[in-house]
Image (tube, helix red, strand yellow):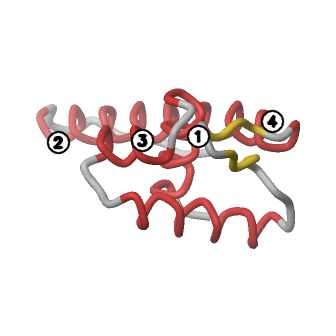
């Protein structure tokens, strides 16, 4: 599981569209589809219901989006801590 895959899923959930998610992420529609397909394969479940007028989340997809949002927020917070630590002399960062 990669952050890129989680980010794609969150954007698709937010926009309801693989095309719109791709535009927001500045990547191709195919890249979004591949990332989500790989995530589905790794989790052994379907996350999206693909329809002509867009996509919707399966129940497991909804659960995965909640998890993904938490993970992406934690990653961002951690990166901010590390960036701040570089600017402050003798600051220690402890990771559990």
Earlier in the chain: of badge 1 and badge 3, it is 3
User: Of discs 1 and 3, which sits in the foreground?
Assistant: 3
Residue occupying image coordinates x 24% and y 37%: 85
- The residue at which mark 2 appears reads as 86
Earlier in the chain: of badge 1 and badge 2, it is 1
- The residue at which mark 1 appears reads as 71
Residue occupying image coordinates x 75% and y 38%: 57
Indicate whether 8 appears above or below 14.
below
Q: Secondary structure at mark 1?
A: helix
User: Of discs 2 and 4, which sits in the foreground?
Assistant: 4
79 or 35: which is nearer to us? Answer: 35
- The residue at which mark 3 appears reads as 21
Indicate whether 16 appears above or below 45.
above
- The residue at which mark 4 appears reads as 63
Indicate whether 87 appears above or below 50.
above
Tell me how far mark 4 sits from mark 1, CA to CA.
13 Å
Q: Mark 4 Cα within 10 Å, few/some/many (few <14, many 20+)?
A: few
Contact between labelled residues 3 and 1, with CB atoms less than 8 Å apart: no
Residue 95 vs residue 46: left or right?
left
Tell me how far mark 2 sits from mark 4, CA to CA.
35 Å
Contact between labelled residues 4 and 3, with CB atoms less than 8 Å apart: no
User: Of discs 3 and 4, which sits in the foreground?
Assistant: 3
């Amino acid at each position: 599981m990669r952050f890129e895959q989680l980010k794609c899923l969150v954007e698709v959930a937010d926009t309801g569209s693989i095309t719109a998610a791709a535009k927001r992420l500045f990547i191709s529609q195919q890249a979004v589809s591949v990332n989500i397909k790989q995530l589905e394969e790794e989790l052994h479940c379907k996350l999206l219901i693909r329809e002509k007028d867009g996509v919707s989340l399966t129940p497991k997809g909804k659960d995965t989006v909640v998890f993904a949002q938490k993970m992406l927020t934690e990653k961002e917070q951690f990166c901010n801590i590390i960036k701040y630590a570089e600017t402050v002399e003798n600051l220690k960062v402890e990771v559990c």
